[in-house]
Amino acid sequence: MTGAQSDRRRAVPDLTGYSITSEVAGREESLLELEGLASLAANAFVFDDDERSLAVRRLLLLCGAAEFAAPSTTLLLDPVGTPVGMYAVCSAGDLSSRRLAGAVAVARRGRGLVRPDEVRRMQRLAAAQAPVVDGDVYLARIAVASSAAGTGVGRWLLSHMFDAARDAGFTRCVLDVADENTHAGAFYARAGFTEFGTGVAHDEDTGRSCTLRHLAYTF
Amino acid sequence: MSDRLRQLVGETLEVPPESVTDDAAYGTFKGWDSINHVRIIFAIEDAFGIALSDDEVMQLRSLAAIRACLAGRGVGDDESSGA
């Protein structure tokens, strides 16, 4: 065992005893923790701090309005049942409906909880996301717990998602990755994704910007 | 022709009401995104004195669908009532 980072990344992970589930109920906090790892740049653009971010993302999850709410999410559980990885995918129609449900949840149940400036930045961010068309599967999130980082679990999850998406008849996988997230960008490049555009969300009040690279992989 | 619905949608999306075509819909018409969709619905609820359920908010995604819903509730705007 060399222990070299590059070798570890390429290794096929030993997932004996692990399981896959789309059952999110009862695992919401673990999911939020994992999902947060996959949306750091977006959350830093929208929210002032982690507390605000968690409160709003929890609301959207519990209302079933988040892009990573059931049934979009697949969790990888370790042998004792702890989620160590996740991905969330949406069709073009799913994405459109989730965004609508999110806006409804924020307006109806998040009144007073979600601030108008946060809503404005969420709106800007959504407008900067990749165009998703029929036949596309949108990879809204993919994340691996820090305890499992570098073990090949991310690549395994991506392969699992590709297989399921192909079986479901999708022809292309589309995602957004924050320009500043070079680690994830390199991961997707190694997996064969190519860039087909960019979107920039800017908020003049805070001076914050978030540049999203639109990546695609054709099956 | 007076058309309160077209007016409300235009005002919410900050576009001239006459540019809001009958096929205008969430996701395809300029500026009609998820947040503005909810703003449109709230404006309609206030203007017509009705309350729409979350399911209706999710389903009423076009000018035509909203117009049909209003007509069904007997609060249709001028155009749908043939005025």
Image (cartoon, helix red, strand yellow):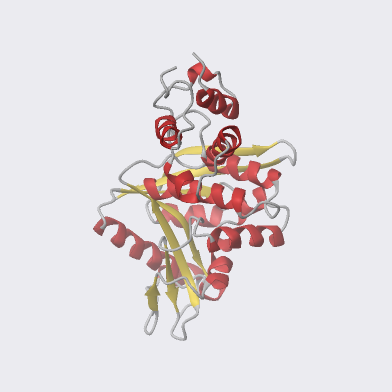
Considering depth in this image, is B70 or B33 the residue closer to the camera? B70
Question: Where residue A16 appears, x then y in whole percent?
Answer: 37, 83
Please state the horizontal and vertical placement of residue A19, each as a whole percent of the image: 38, 78
Q: Is residue B46 visible?
A: yes
Visible residue check, residue A128? no
| Quarter of the image where the N terminus of chain A is located | bottom left
The number of numbered badges drawn on the structure is: 0
Q: Is residue A55 above or below residue A80?
A: above
Which residue is rendered at x = 64% and y = 45% of the image? A119
Left or right placement of residue A50 versus residue A86 in this view: right
Q: Which residue occupies the extreme front position in the image?
A: B74
Q: Quadrant of residue A15?
A: bottom left
Toward the viewer: A48 or B1? B1
Q: Is residue B58 above or below residue A156?
A: above
Q: Position of residue A192 (x, y in %)?
A: 37, 52
Q: Residue at x 63, y 57 (%)?
A: A56
